[in-house]
Amino acid sequence: MSRMGTPAQAALRITILAGVMVALLATGLRGVWPAWWLVVLVAGLAVAFALLPEAAMGTAATGLVLAWWGFAFRGGPYPEALLAAAGLLTAHLAAVVAGYGPRDLPPDPATVRLWAVRGAVVFLAAPAVYLVATLLEGQPEPGGIWIAGLAAALVTTVAAGLVLAGSSQEQ
């Protein structure tokens, strides 16, 4: 057994690292590269995230990637953001599955399939949001759009919480 655990655990942890780094470097496809120190910082946090998937380093690494995207581009939409979304979602899902057990415990195939399906469903939101942003690009901003967006996010969060609470009570 290696320091990375089983081969499947090692693959999950490599996926965590790769997902974060792909998300960070995806801006390079548009010719906008992060500073070397940001790449080193995010890589270090991503390695820590891969080694300790339950720890806060994952939040810091993904937060820095999101901040970089916010600073790198004004306006948009940019199709490279779909690659970044896929990278961050993949890293998150790999961390969830890796966090279910110690390194020497191979992940349950049914659990991997469950989270892969959930991830695929969640990812469907990214192209939908990109499409809406593309259609609305250059249009004047309707009054109250931010309040409507916040309300939609709140309703979605509450609905998801109720669904998850209901499913956990059934178990």
Image (spheres, helix red, strand yellow):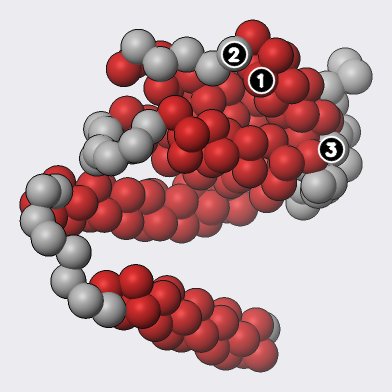
Question: From the viewer's perspective, is 67 left or right of 44?
Answer: left
Residue neighbourhood size for the residue with mark 1, other residues' Cα within 10 Å, grouped as few (<14), some (14–19), many (≥20): some
Q: Nearer the viewer, mark 3 or mark 1?
A: 1
- Which numbered marker is on residue 167? none
Q: CA distance from mark 1 to mark 2?
A: 5 Å
- Badge 1 amino acid: Leu
- The numbered mark at residue 52 is 3
Q: CA distance from mark 3 to mark 1?
A: 21 Å
Q: Are marks 3 and 1 in contact (CB under 8 Å)?
A: no
Neighbours of disc 3 within 10 Å: few (<14), some (14-19), many (20+): some
Q: Is residue 159 left or right of residue 46?
A: left
Q: Look at the numbered discs 2 and 3 and tell me whether their residues touch, using CB distance below 8 Å.
A: no
The residue positioned 46% from the left and 81% from the top of the image is: 154
Give the residue at x 32% y 56%.
125
Mark 2 and mark 3 lie on one chain; the one further toward the N terminus is 2
The residue that appears at 73% across and 41% down in the rendered structure is 60
The x and y percentages for residue 95 are 68, 42
Above or below residue 46? Residue 52 is below
Helix, strand or loop at mark 1: helix
Residue 41 appears in view? yes
Quarter of the image with the C terminus in it: bottom right
Q: x, y (%) of residue 30? A: 31, 17
**Amino acid at pointer 3:** Leu
Evaluate if marks 1 and 2 touch, with contact meaning CB atoms under 8 Å apart. yes
- SS at mark 2 in the image: loop
Q: Residues within 10 Å of mark 2 (few under 14, many from 20)?
A: few
Q: Which mark is residue 38?
A: 1
